Amino acid sequence: MEVLNNKIDFAVVVSVKNANPNGDPLNGNRPRQNYEGYGEISDVCLKRKIRNRLQDMEESIFVQSDERKTDQFKSLKDRADSVEELKKAKKGKDKDIEKFMKVACKQWIDVRSFGQIYNFEKGQSVGIRGPVSIHSAYSIHPIDITSMQITKSVNNEASENKDSSTFGEKHRVDFGVYVFYGSVNTQLAEKTDFTRRDADKIKESLQTLFENDSSSARPDGSMEVHKLYWWEHNSKFGQYSSAKVHRSLKWELKREQPKSIEDVYFYIDDLEGLKVDEYEGN
């Protein structure tokens, strides 16, 4: 399989309507905001969604969420120990860190994409650096958050003259447009054997990021990918820095507080010799 030889940069435009895109557990699970009132979705949250989409595509995933497990393993250690080649590379005369890393990357697409840290032996860990980097997403305008009081039913037996309901709060972003960026580094792709096919899978997962992702906080249709901008350079190191490429995505707000995606106009500042492919979200 062809290892990726061209640097890639990308940007994704996402809308949120009446949903909590990423609750902050240290703030009552309110949607994340920075100190200026702009919404935030963490890079960890975005990688989780990418992993879930890759898993839906029947790709082998190492870091699986409990509700989406496709195997019987209860921990990452158990999943790693289930691969005989990995176990051999950790023990005795066959102990080989390079071989261990190579086997792990071959086994799981999220490892060769994002990297992973493994406990190699007592007191020693193995760190794999992945070629795909993902930034946190930030809204392009301050967001409004609505909170409501809800009644929650629990399974505990109700005491006499009392029911099992408790009160809580639920929070949502009324409407927000978020943008996040990412890159694929070819030098690290060589080390993890990240291929062009893998890059295409990442691209597909970004276009369909919120499919099969609904919950009470994020009902179906409340979060949507509108645009994916994909820049493929003509060399391993790229014609431009990732920062300059990402800055070439610009926008204008047609109203101070957008109510729909139509209230925002996105455009690209051309960079000489670097073509951008624009995809609509599915």
Image (cartoon, rainbow, N blue to C red):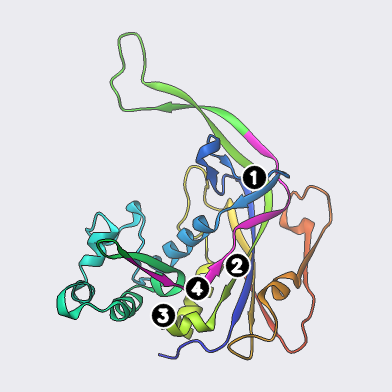
Q: Earlier in the sequence, mark 3 or mark 4?
A: 3
The type of residue carrying mark 1 is: Gln
- Gap in Å between the C-alphas at discs 2 and 3? 28 Å
- Gap in Å between the C-alphas at discs 1 and 4? 27 Å
Q: Which mark is residue 202?
A: 4
- Gap in Å between the C-alphas at discs 1 and 3? 35 Å
- Gap in Å between the C-alphas at discs 2 and 1? 25 Å
Tag 3's secondary structure? helix
Q: Are marks 2 and 4 in contact (CB under 8 Å)?
A: no
Q: In the image, residue 179 lies at what x, y percent?
A: 66, 61
Residue 143 in magenta?
yes
Q: Earlier in the sequence, mark 2 or mark 3?
A: 3
Q: Earlier in the sequence, mark 1 or mark 4?
A: 1
Majority SS type along the magenta span = strand
Q: In which image quadrant can residue 280 be found?
A: bottom right
- Gap in Å between the C-alphas at discs 2 and 4? 13 Å
Q: In the image, residue 163 lies at what x, y percent?
A: 36, 16
- Gap in Å between the C-alphas at discs 3 and 4? 15 Å
Residue linked to disc 3: 192
Residue linked to disc 1: 33
